[in-house]
Amino acid sequence: MQVELVSPEAVLFSGECSQVVTRTVDGDIAFLDNHAPFIGALDVGQTQLWAADGVVSLAINGGFVEVSSNAVTILSDDAMAAQDIDVQEAQADLQAADQALASDADDTEAALAKKWAETRIQVSGGN
Amino acid sequence: MAGGQERILRRRISSIDATKKITRAMELIAASRIVKAQGRVQAAKPYSEKVTDVIANLAGGGAGVDHPLLAQPGDINRVAYVVIAADRGLCGGYNNNVLRAVERSIDSDRAAGRDYALILSGKKAAGYFSFRGYDVHAAFEGFSDQPNYSDAKAMAESVAELFENGEAQQVQLAYTRFLSMGSQEVTVDQFMPLEASEIGAEATEEAGGGYEFEPEPSEILGRLLPRYAEARLYAALLEASASEHAARQRAMKAATDNAEDLKINLTRIMNRARQDAITTEIMEIVGGAEAMSQDDDGDLEDLIAQSIEGSFAALATDRTDA
């Protein structure tokens, strides 16, 4: 199936894939060829694309996915490929978010920042 | 004394030449940036097209259209203006055209008894309105050259807050649309509430293509509409930056051409002044020699030859000084 990953500034990925795994706000979901039409809101999480030349791993900070007529479109205004992730920056963000949460456990913004930092670290493989 | 005017002209010409070099460089830079900016406008299109597609499909799937961004207000007491201008000048009428259009619009709102709120992008916009005593709600700057999506996001957030709190019942977006290299046009469009018909969110068609939704269509729409607003603002920022570079390129081309004309004219005047000075000097020498030959019956030709040589030497040192 044809897969496109589109951010507001550029098309980040476009090509044939055999499988797509991503995470909607209700949980992980996988798409194979000829999946039924689907629209979902994406959570902060990892997305994997099984492309012809290997698996592409990305960290996605929320977005949308649409599947129709054997094409998957992922819309995200903040997506990073594994090789583009700055692990040190993610670690620093994680620490900052942890500190914010320690002083105010209800800080939803910090909770999101923490999740995003953890996702980036996980995707980059730098646990 | 004779070389004085010439020296002044020479100095003016060299300063005009330096100015011309600067304007020419700015023209070339602006020209290369237009192409880049146009590329960014194109690169941003797939995203907003897809977002619009998804909204249409959601509406087809029965998503309710009761999102705050779609709420049509009854009475409009306050209109918010999102104004996109440049951080820098030297771009002809680019800034003034947008700013005047907004000012006119505010005037007509006031006549209708409506208040205004200003959300500005670009140093020039902030300067213009604060100098004229307008109340500026929020001003953003530093990205008119090359706006990023995060800039659009920050602006859209501040606009949406104003609108969703009910502080403003309508939001207008004023920017310069990039039609082509040669023509750009100031537009003042409605930004919020979002027009359901414009984004295809009218829940008319029943056949939603049999989509599955996760979560509920209305919830997805709720998340998607703010993205749509951001994408639209981002597109406007990008078009405005392309227009800014085009306007600057034109202004700098005109400045370069003017400098060239000025230089040609001044060179002509300078040459004439130099020629005049030489002619006057020769006349003086000839006159002087003649006067001397009447006093004294010396060899007239020798005398003329000597004094001409002498004054040419003087003229030569004069010019190397200059």
Image: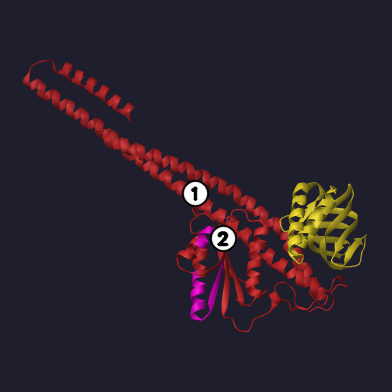
Say which mark, if any, is on residue B184. 2
> Chain A is which colour?
yellow
Q: Chain of mark 2?
A: B
Q: Does the magenta segment cover residue B111?
A: yes
Q: Which residues are magenta?
A: B103-126
Q: Chain of mark 1?
A: B
Secondary element under disc 1, as helix, strand or loop, is helix
Residue at left offset 27%, top offset 26%: B315
Is residue B318 rendered to the left or right of residue A116? left
- In this picture the colour scheme is by chain
Residue at left offset 72%, top offset 71%: B199
Say which mark, if any, is on residue B322. none
In red, which chain?
B
Circle 1 sits on which residue? B253
Q: Position of residue B58 (x, y in %)?
A: 80, 72
Is residue B219 rendered to the left or right of residue B40? right
Q: Quadrant of the C terminus of chain B?
A: top left
Q: Does the magenta segment cover residue A42?
A: no
Q: Position of residue A8 (x, y in %)?
A: 72, 59
- Tag 1: amino acid: Lys
Residue B34 visible, this angle: yes
Residue A11 visible, this angle: no
Is residue B170 rendered to the left or right of residue B215? left
Q: Which quadrant would residue B188 be assigned to in this image?
A: bottom right
Q: Nearer the viewer, residue A114 or B200?
A: A114
Q: Specify few, some or many for label 2: CA neighbours under 10 Å numbering under 14, 14-19, or 20 or more.
A: many
Residue at left offset 33%, top offset 26%: B320
Q: Quadrant of the N terminus of chain B?
A: top left
